[in-house]
Image (cartoon, rainbow, N blue to C red):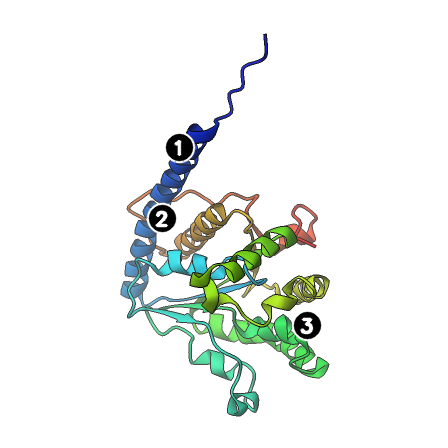
């Protein structure tokens, strides 16, 4: 007699997938309630929150930001996704145009890419000189020390994606007319320059991971788990502050196999995609 196959098939498999999505949506809803609690707390306390999202193309920055901000106050939440510098901005101090987007009292600022463009795409694509890149990498920790000493809570994320998953998502962008606005000229070289981007990432994380601005890495091949655990990290980080927020719903710690500090990579306990 053949062994019984307990795996779902056909309609049962679809129902199982839908059930898992419903469970993920329910967990996200609870986390969004906690995010509202956290923003009410920051508005009352005047706490300034700055969240930086960096990562390769198609790593999930846009979707993560949508889930983070969906229920937050539009007046107290700013999302910065800056275009390439204008001719005037090219003559400014590199950090200058980003300072306009830093949070005021009670605000949250979320950067969809940030001042770290200079250490990533600009380095790989040659949009700035080696001297400019070296100056940035030395200045970034001091810049972050200055803003955190001013009272800003800085949370930096590196969203890490595998090469195969990136290709899958980039191909999906090109074939879906609803995603045309997400397609850029740089998408075409994301796979070709994979190794170069890996080297730039490793150098950036190693040299800008410091006490005032530590990097938190997130495995993002599973979008739902990545978003959920990233939000958990934001919430638990804020709750750990002196007189931090309390939540009206349960907030568990993030899964350490999905969200982890860059120091775990240094120690060899976690790996980033090569």
Depth order, front residue of 213/136 = 136
Give the residue at mark 3: 124
Q: Which secondary structure, mark 2?
A: helix
Q: Earlier in the sequence, mark 2 or mark 3?
A: 2
Query: Do we see residue 246 in this rendering?
Result: no
Q: Which residue is labeled 1 in the image? A: 15
Distance from disc 1 to disc 2, alpha carbons, whole Å, reads 24 Å
Question: Which tag is nearer the camera, tag 3 or tag 1?
Answer: 1
The x, y position of residue 254, in whole percent, is 48, 45
Q: Given contact means CB atoms under 8 Å apart, are the residues at marks 3 and 1 in contact?
A: no
Which residue is more in the foreground, 68 or 36? Answer: 68
The image position of residue 59, as x and y in percent, is 54, 58
Residue 182 position in % (x across, y down): 48, 66
Question: In the rendered image, is residue 97 in sight?
Answer: yes
Residue sticking out furthest to the top = 1
> Dividing the image into 4 quarters, which one contains the C terminus?
bottom right
Q: Which residue: 47% across, 52% down?
A: 230
User: Quick one: label 1, few (<14), some, or many (20+) residues within 10 Å?
Assistant: few
**Res. 31 mark:** 2
């Amino acid at each position: 007699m053949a062994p019984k196959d307990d795996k779902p098939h056909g309609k049962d498999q679809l129902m199982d997938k839908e059930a898992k999505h419903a469970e993920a949506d329910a967990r996200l809803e609870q986390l969004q309630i906690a995010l509202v609690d956290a923003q009410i707390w920051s508005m009352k306390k005047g706490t300034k929150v700055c969240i930086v999202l960096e990562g390769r193309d198609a790593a999930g920055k846009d979707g993560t930001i949508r889930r983070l901000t969906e229920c937050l106050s539009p007046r107290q939440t700013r999302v910065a996704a800056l275009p390439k510098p204008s001719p005037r901005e090219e003559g400014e101090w590199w950090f200058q145009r980003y300072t306009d987007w830093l949070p005021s009292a009670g605000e949250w600022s979320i950067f969809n890419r940030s001042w770290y463009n200079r250490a990533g795409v600009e380095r790989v694509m040659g949009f700035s000189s080696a001297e400019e890149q070296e100056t940035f990498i030395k200045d970034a920790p001091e810049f972050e020390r200055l803003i955190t000493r001013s009272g800003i809570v800085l949370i930096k994320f590196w969203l890490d994606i595998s090469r195969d998953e990136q290709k899958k998502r980039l191909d999906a962008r090109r074939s879906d007319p609803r995603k045309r606005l997400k397609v850029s000229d740089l998408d075409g070289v994301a796979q070709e320059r994979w190794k170069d981007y890996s080297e730039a990432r490793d150098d950036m994380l190693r040299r800008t991971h410091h006490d005032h601005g530590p990097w938190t890495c997130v495995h993002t091949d599973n979008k739902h788990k990545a978003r959920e655990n990233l939000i958990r990290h934001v919430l638990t980080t804020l709750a750990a502050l002196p007189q931090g927020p309390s939540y009206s719903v349960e907030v568990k710690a993030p899964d350490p196999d999905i969200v982890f500090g860059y120091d775990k990579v240094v120690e060899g306990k976690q790996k980033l995609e090569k």
